[in-house]
Amino acid sequence: MSSMDLHRIFDLQYQASRAQVDVPLLVRRERLLRLQKMLDENGPALAAAVQADFGMRSARVTELLDLLLLRQQLKHTLRNLARWSGRQRVRTPLMLQPGKAWIERQPLGVVGIISPWNYPVQLALAPAITALAAGNRVMLKPSELTPHTSSQLASLVSQFFAPEEFCVIEGDVGVATQFSGLQFDHLLFTGSTSVGRRVAQAAAAHLTPTTLELGGKSPCIVAADCNLREVALKIAHGKLVNAGQTCIAPDFVLLPRGREAEFADAFMEAVRKLYPRISGNPDYTSILTKRHLARLKQMLRQAQGLGAQVHWMQEGAAAQPDEGAETQAMAWGDSVERQMAPALVFGATGEMQLMQEEIFGPILPVISYERMDDVIKAINASPRPLALYWFGQDERVRDAVLSRTVSGGVCVNDTLLHVAHENLPFGGVGESGWGAYHAEQGFLRFTHQKAVFVQSRWSATSLMYPPYGARFDRMMEWIRRWL
């Protein structure tokens, strides 16, 4: 898309948002119902597009991880939209009575969304649902790394929405850069921290408020009282769904020292239960591209070179880090070759790339600890994560971890599920991002809350006008007694 076309569409939405500042509830509901209809009628087509982009990602995975969450979000939003959108009465302090006040919830105007490739339907449409519910116009720039999905979204959205309501902008990194520099009323970006910094800088030129969901290294803490077989299954599922290409996937495990072999055996058992085979298994998603796969292999080669021990969760997979021995590991087809076998890494240190960057793949470092205090100190010494996972039975230890650490969200005795809770906000903190766009908190993120105070015909505040004197002193004394 040319720069001229991009600005033309933005101007179209901008003018429409200013011409209709107040978007009636019925209009908002009708837009959401159109989006719901789009998903209901075109779920298989969207799943096929995602499959084409990944090479191996079954329609069932997309139904679970993308479409199901969107359907749940739409249902929840439609059920609560009237309450969220309505005038919010607030109590008036005594000194301002008998005046009255309320908060008027208004659309911001035009919301820009830059979505990532890993959940290319859900992470594109989830913020769009919330922004449309709040009465905004929406411009969506999906990832250029999932071109089939982006094209399908563009085609479908154009069938169900006028361009001044909701449109999809396709294009490469250059288009995304221009997109982030538009004068949006709000800009939401989901992706890496490094790109998020550039998006925030571009938005700052227009003082555009942003919501950034940036991921990070989400720790998974295993307490000493855990049943490792039960814990390993939940960790394996959270780590390996979508082959680890999840912003809130457990990025490393903190394990009581001395239980390393037990955890490795339990994790191997869990992997075999979830994915009896890796190569050719339609339930196990491919790494998106060969470039992404090469990065993961480089991480492992570097870790091994610095003394880490890699435990592959599939026989023969140890040859994978060696480019020359790939054909010995398994007979990979064109897309199956990117189905990377899971690996545990023991002995990882801070100088290793896999402990410095978000992994975004099926590699799981396991770090041993002696005391929970050491775990808390280590987490607090690192950038604040998007998610934190805690497994254990002692509520006092759990509460100590929760109160002494800061993360975007927490899931206790499981992984990932907090993101599916329809009444919980979802977002990061610090380097893992800022702002939330789920539930009512997300609705408010895309809403201007305008303060309104209505003065009565008679007001005691006139007694506080100058000239000041004895009457003013008596009034102030009376107010102080009632405060």
Image (cartoon, rainbow, N blue to C red):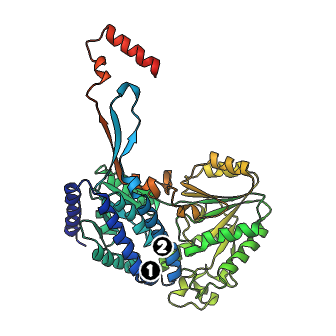
> Mark 2 touching mark 1, by CB under 8 A?
yes
Seen in the image, is 126 located left or right of residue 184? right
In the image, what residue type sits under mark 2?
A: Asp
Q: Which residue is mark 2?
A: 66
Seen in the image, is 155 located left or right of residue 145? left
Q: Residue at x 20, y 61 (%)?
A: 11
Seen in the image, is 375 located left or right of residue 109? right
Depth order, front residue of 140/288: 140
Depth order, front residue of 92/165: 92
Work out whether mark 2 precedes mark 1 in sequence or the reverse, and give the earlier one.
1
Residue 146 falls in image quadrant: bottom left
Give the image location of residue 353, x and y in percent.
Answer: 57, 64
Q: CA distance from mark 2 to mark 1?
A: 10 Å
Q: Residue at x 41, y 16 (%)?
A: 478
Depth order, front residue of 346/220: 220
Residue 42 drawn above or below residue 461: below
Q: Residue at x 30, y 74 (%)?
A: 160
Residue 171 drawn above or below residue 55: above
Give the image location of residue 237, x and y in percent.
Answer: 63, 72
Q: Residue at x 40, y 29 (%)?
A: 93
Q: Which residue is mark 1?
A: 50
